Image (spheres, rainbow, N blue to C red):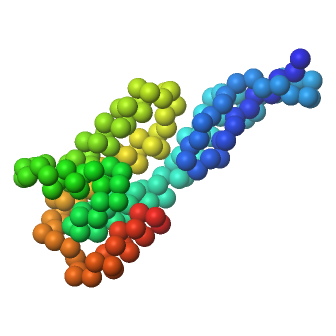
């Protein structure tokens, strides 16, 4: 019986589900890929750190698209931001803004993810979720909006869809 230490989906951009451990191999020996668990963990940390600038830029684009185009135009397209827009309109309390609802729901889903999924839930998922919620809150404080940026609803809808999609 032979084994190979393997990691499935290591280069998955979304983090993927990882399978670590001995795997059968036809080679007749026990191989430890990347010189063991410690070196493999270091490689994963380096890979995540290299992806950090792109994750940050992508999260900022999503936050900007949601805050500047979805929230002021009341574009409720679904998901957490859509529910936040609806609740922001239904609950007329000054401090309960759509951005606050957005942060609360995202953090609740993050806690649910940790409870329902395994511990390998993902550092990148946690980073992007917390950054997104924080950026929307910061944008509310730095650039308070009274209404849409333009009177062109189609243009605003275009940017509300395209910015988060980039």
**Which residue: 40% across, 68% down?**
161
Q: Position of residue 129 (x, y in %)?
A: 37, 46
Q: Position of residue 101 (x, y in %)?
A: 22, 47
Residue sitting nearer the eye, 69 or 29:
69
Instruction: Give above or below for 35 relative to 88.
Output: above
Location of the N terminus by quadrant is top right
Instruction: Give above or below for 125 relative to 53.
Output: above
Task: Please count the marks in the image.
Answer: 0
Residue 90 appears left or right of 86:
left
Residue 53 visible, this angle: no
Residue 64 appears left or right of 92:
right
Q: Position of residue 32 (x, y in %)?
A: 77, 28
Instruction: Give above or below for 115 relative to 104.
Output: above
Q: Position of residue 6 (x, y in %)?
A: 74, 32
**Which residue: 12% across, 69% down?**
146
**Which residue: 20% across, 73% down?**
148
The quadrant where residue 149 appears: bottom left
Residue sitting nearer the eye, 145 or 127:
145
The quadrant where residue 67 appears: bottom left
Residue 22 appears left or right of 16:
right
Residue 144 visible, this angle: yes
Instruction: Give above or below for 143 relative to 25.
Output: below
**Which residue: 23% across, 56% down?**
85
Pick out the residue farthest to the top. Answer: 1
């Amino acid at each position: 019986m032979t084994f190979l230490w393997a990691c499935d989906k290591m280069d998955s951009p979304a983090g993927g589900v990882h399978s670590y451990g001995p795997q059968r191999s036809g080679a007749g020996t026990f191989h430890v890929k990347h010189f063991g668990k410690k070196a493999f963990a270091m490689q994963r940390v380096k890979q995540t750190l290299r992806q950090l600038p792109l994750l940050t830029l992508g999260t900022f684009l999503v936050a900007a698209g949601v805050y500047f185009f979805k929230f002021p135009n009341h574009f409720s397209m679904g998901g957490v931001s859509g529910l936040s827009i609806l609740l922001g309109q239904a609950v007329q309390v000054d401090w309960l803004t759509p951005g606050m609802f957005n942060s609360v729901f995202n953090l609740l889903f993050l806690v649910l993810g940790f409870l329902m999924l395994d511990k390998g839930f993902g550092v990148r998922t946690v980073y992007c979720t917390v950054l997104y919620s924080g950026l929307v809150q910061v944008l509310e404080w730095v650039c308070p909006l009274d209404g849409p940026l333009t009177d062109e609803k189609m243009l605003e809808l275009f940017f509300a869809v395209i910015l988060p999609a980039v």
